[in-house]
Amino acid sequence: MKILQITDTHLTGDGRPLFGSSPAQRLAAAAEVIRRDHGDAAFCLFTGDLADDGSAQAYRQLADIAATLPMPCHFLVGNHDARPALLDALWPAGEAAGGFAQRAIDTEHGRFLLLDTQRDRAAGGAYCGRRLDWLAGQLQRAGPRTRFWLVMHHPPLPLGIPSMDQYALDAAAADSLWQVLEPHRERIRHLLFGHVHRAIGGSWRGIPFSCAKSTNHQVALDLRSRGVDVPGGHDAPGFAVILIDRDSVVVHHHEFLATGPAFWI
Ligand SMILES: [Fe+2]
């Protein structure tokens, strides 16, 4: 099974450029590459910060671009998003569990759990008791052979980039999340998140994770800056192409704007 992860599209409702590039043009370029090369993907996960300004206009723009893709698309909420406007434009009616942007998607390789880590549009993430209850129910009620995939906007761990680590999932929330996940640890295959605008892989308490690049602007690999502002850069934008088999998960980061002549090696 092939799936795609697109993250941190940061669309601007009025079409203005953001940090010198057009989020809509870049997402449209990614969509063109996906139609050409990845039309066989089972679905595409958009992991939050879909609209930079949370405007209804930006979500309509995203719905229009997503409609050009041949596979189903699923949308998560990030800190920049306005949850009601996002749910209204991009979610199937009545599917948001308890009003949060959370739902489960069953696939041939297990159940994808889409988690809502937004804290009132503050930059950092949270995960409250109501959301935990839903997650615990999903994990407990599934059959013993069900495998799980966690999908969220904020990372539940620091990544060594201090300016972004201060805006990760709140440490207490990450611990509460772990209390719920730990009994099911062996059944969790992978964790996907966005928010950090970089291609990153590793593991958290034994769970493999990956983070994909933004389709618009990137966070710099700056392991020292500790101010409130985040150092950014225009490294190549990307999306992730994830190949899943019974015994493997492979995450490719595709820099879709790369140009230059192709050649055989
Ligand atoms: Fe973002």
Image (cartoon, rainbow, N blue to C red):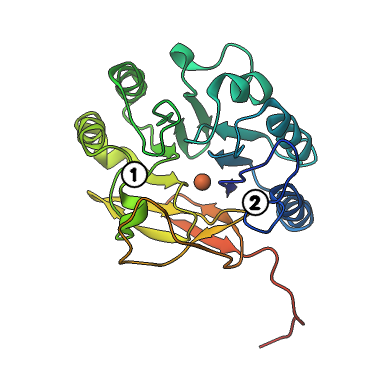
In which quarter of the view is residue 156 placed?
top left
Task: Out of 98 and 172, give the one closest to the viewer.
Answer: 172
Q: Residue at x 41, y 33 (%)?
A: 122
Element assignment for label 2: loop
189 shown above or below 32: above
Element assignment for label 1: loop
Task: Out of 167 and 40, give the one closest to the viewer.
Answer: 167
Left or right of residue 216: residue 76: left
Q: CA distance from mark 2 to mark 1?
A: 22 Å
Q: Residue at x 30, y 22 (%)?
A: 128
Q: Which mark is residue 168?
A: 1
3 shown above or below 235: above
Left or right of residue 152: residue 126: left
Task: Out of 235 and 208, give the one closest to the viewer.
Answer: 235
Judging by the rendered image, the residue that carries numbered circle 2 is 18
Tell me, yes or no, if residue 49 can be seen here.
yes
The amino acid sitting under disc 2 is Leu
219 shown above or below 46: below
Image quadrant containing the C terminus: bottom right
The amino acid sitting under disc 1 is Ala
